[in-house]
């Protein structure tokens, strides 16, 4: 899955999220999550990647309206934050909500325009719409390669899990194999990889640490 098919698929996903934002506004439902509690739970799992560091740079892929930036602010951490999203509507909303905030920037697109200590990607692999699963899997792997290249200390991402209850699975969503992605990250990016699949949601998070002292 490359070139024009990728662009077409991501354009559809962009419109999907733009409609969610139009319906629900700047809220967890506006980025297609169930609620604030599960959103904050995801943030906590993803931010395990920075260990005990309280000053760092971060690329947030699939930033939506910038909720993770707010969460980090609540923690009192010093973060040079870049939010990236393929949805123009999301980026417009994020910029409006965070106008004048220092150390906080938002970029429309699929990739960060810089390297950072860490990168996180929350939910960007979930919505495939009518893209064939095998083609979407290829897109996921290529995106992970790009995230790795833009992350000096490590990165974290989440996916819906293939271990979800069959009756809850939906055809427009992508359910990844956590064991396959763990193996891919372990062999390709770092020996220091953690698979988190124990936090009560139908998903998992992978932490890829390039430096255990980070």
Image (cartoon, grey):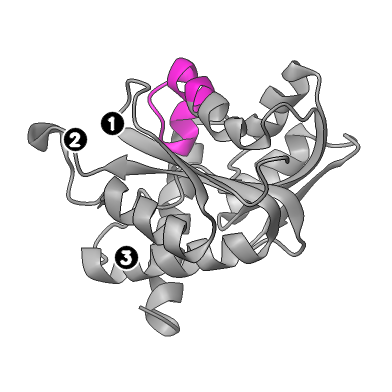
Any part of residue 129 in sight: yes
- Residue farthest bottom in this picture: 3
Q: Which mark is residue 16?
A: none
Q: Which mark is residue 136?
A: 3
Which residue occupies the foreground of this view, 188 or 172?
A: 188
For the point 88% across and 40% down, the residue is: 103
Query: Horizontal and vertical percent for residue 8?
Result: 40, 73
Which comes before the other along the chain, label 3 or label 2? 3
> Is residue 27 shown left or right of residue 129?
right
Q: Quadrant of the N terminus?
A: bottom left
Pointer 1 residue: 202
Any magenta on residue 64? Answer: no
Any magenta on residue 35? Answer: yes
Which residue occupies the foreground of this view, 52 or 57?
A: 52
For the point 56% across and 58% down, the residue is: 86
Q: Which mark is residue 164?
A: 2
Q: Is residue 145 above or below residue 40?
A: below
Q: Main secondary structure of the magenta part?
A: helix
Q: Are marks 3 and 2 in contact (CB under 8 Å)?
A: no
Which residue occupies the foreground of this view, 56 or 85?
A: 56
SS at circle 3: helix
Q: Is residue 35 above or below residue 21?
A: above
> Is residue 51 shown left or right of residue 134?
right
Q: Are marks 2 and 1 in contact (CB under 8 Å)?
A: yes
For the point 67% across and 31% down, the residue is: 51
SS at circle 2: loop
**From which residue to which does the magenta span run?**
28-41
Cα–Cα span, label 2 and label 1: 6 Å
Query: Horizontal and vertical percent for residue 182?
Result: 37, 51
SS at circle 1: loop
């Amino acid at each position: 899955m490359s070139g024009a098919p990728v662009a077409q698929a991501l354009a559809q996903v962009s419109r999907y999220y733009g409609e969610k934002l139009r319906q629900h506004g700047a809220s967890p439902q506006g980025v297609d999550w169930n609620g604030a509690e599960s959103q904050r739970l995801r943030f906590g799992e993803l931010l395990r990647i920075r260990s005990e560091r309280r000053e760092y740079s971060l690329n947030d892929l699939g930033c939506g309206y910038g909720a993770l930036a707010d969460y980090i602010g609540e923690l009192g951490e010093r973060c040079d934050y870049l939010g990236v999203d393929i949805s123009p509507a999301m980026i417009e909303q994020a910029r409006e909500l965070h106008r004048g905030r220092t150390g906080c920037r938002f970029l429309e697109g699929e990739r960060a325009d810089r390297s950072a200590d860490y990168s996180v990607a929350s939910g960007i692999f979930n919505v495939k719409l009518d893209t064939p699963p095998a083609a979407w899997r290829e897109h996921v792997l290529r995106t992970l390669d790009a995230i790795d290249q833009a992350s000096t200390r490590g990165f974290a991402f989440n996916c819906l899990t293939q271990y979800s209850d069959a009756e809850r699975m939906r055809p427009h969503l992508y359910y990844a194999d956590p064991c396959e992605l763990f193996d891919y990250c372990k062999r390709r990016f770092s020996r220091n990889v953690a698979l988190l699949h124990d936090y009560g949601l139908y998903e998992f998070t992978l932490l890829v640490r390039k430096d255990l002292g980070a």
